[in-house]
Amino acid sequence: MTRIGCRAHDYGKLPAAELAAVLHAKGYTGAQLAMPRGIAGIADFAHITEEQLAEIRTAFAAQDVEISVLSCYQDLSAPDADARRAAVDAVKRTLGYAKVLGAKMVGSETAWGPCTDEEKAARRPLMLDSIARITEEAARLDAVFAVESVDVHPLCTPELLPQLALGRLLTEGWITSADEVERVAVCAQGLKISVQLCHPLAAAEQAGQEVPSCCTDNLTLASPVRLPPLAPVPQREIPAAWVDALADAMGQGLPLYRATHAVHSCLLLRAGRILYRCEDLGRHNALDKAVGCALTEGVPLAECVLFTSGRVPVDMVRKAIRAGVPALVSKSMPTVQSLELAEEYGLKLFIRQKK
């Protein structure tokens, strides 16, 4: 079961029963809860009573809102030793609270913004020392502790964010099916997406650098997790009428494109019918959203065709292969490398413009 959640304190600092009722009314079934930020009457992590914990647990259970992440925002790499020790103690205390509340995990964050290489080198051993101390307590309590990086911010339009996250995880090779995702949470402002998987991710043996085929001139690290090898896509006959229908729909333009002429689009078709029409600033995001829509609703991607409005460099072909679709259509010519990769894994590439 995939739960859709949010950062609870985005809806204010309220009594536990009131906050849980608000989240339930908004349609959420999960929550990231930072008690001093979200629960009225709680000022810090050091003075939370058993009665307050019982009240929170009862209130959220009554509204069927799972406390997916119990947050304890702390600077675990603070250069000051006393401040860092206090931060570690706060997280350890919160691990105990999580057991009482039935929370799935306790989460903290790196807490620093962009740093120079020298600053990162100085903070890293302090962070690792703090994590080691916390994980000892987590192991003793049989609890889960997670650390969130706060220094990566994707650029995207704010619609379909859970679908964007799910699609990206699949097309980047971090998961192979939606069954591996336990919950997805989006904060109320739509600025942060948190995903919890049903299993740990294996770290990559080494990281390299990739230059994305977008227009931002960014250098990014290659995937930090060990990715499964690409696999051949299912073979399926693609009627010309399907490609024509996609091209005609793309030629008409989607709403945001018609209003701005500044976004990309991606269509997903199954059995001759267009199921999803997704738009985003980036063509990679638009494709991920379309794939994520299919994952969310259990649509078999092996029976689908994607149409992207953008160019088809090798990373877009790789996404389509990891999604497991038999065909990718574009109105722009692919690169030689794209053609070679598509042929190797059996992905059909169609170039089709509106009539």
Image: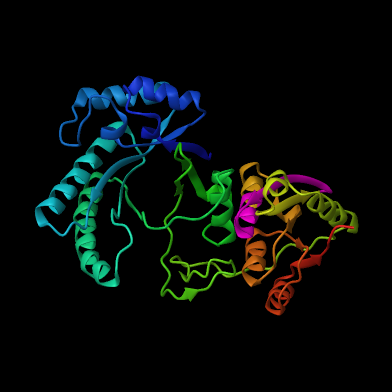
**Residue 215 vertical position relative to residue 354 in the rendered view, above or below:** below
Instruction: Decide which of 170, 218 is in the foreground and name it.
Output: 218
Query: Is 349 inside the magenta-drawn segment?
Result: no
Image-based side of 345 in relation to 24, left or right: right
Q: Residue at x 53, y 50 (%)?
A: 165
**Residue 230 vertical position relative to residue 256 in the rendered view, above or below:** below
Image-based side of 194 in relation to 257, left or right: left
Q: Is residue 63 visible?
A: no
Residue placed furthest toward the front:
260
Image-based side of 261 in relation to 160, left or right: right
**Residue 18 vertical position relative to residue 322 in the rendered view, above or below:** above
Percent coordinates x, y for residue 268 in the rendering:
73, 51
Q: Which residues are magenta?
A: 271-290
Q: Residue at x 55, y 69 (%)?
A: 212
Percent coordinates x, y for residue 298 in the rendering:
66, 44
Quarter of the image for residue 47 reads top left
Number of callouts in the render?
Answer: 0
Percent coordinates x, y for residue 17 in the rendering:
35, 20
Quarter of the image for residue 110 reads bottom left
Image-based side of 324 in relation to 90, left or right: right
**How is colour applied across the structure in the image?**
rainbow
**Residue 9 vertical position relative to residue 88 in the rendered view, above or below:** above
Quarter of the image for residue 312 reads bottom right
Instruction: Decide which of 83, 281 is in the foreground and name it.
Output: 281
Q: Residue at x 32, y 57 (%)?
A: 113
Percent coordinates x, y for residue 91 in the rendering:
22, 45
Q: Is residue 119 visible?
A: yes
Location of the C terminus (image quadrant)? bottom right
Q: Residue at x 40, y 30 (%)?
A: 11
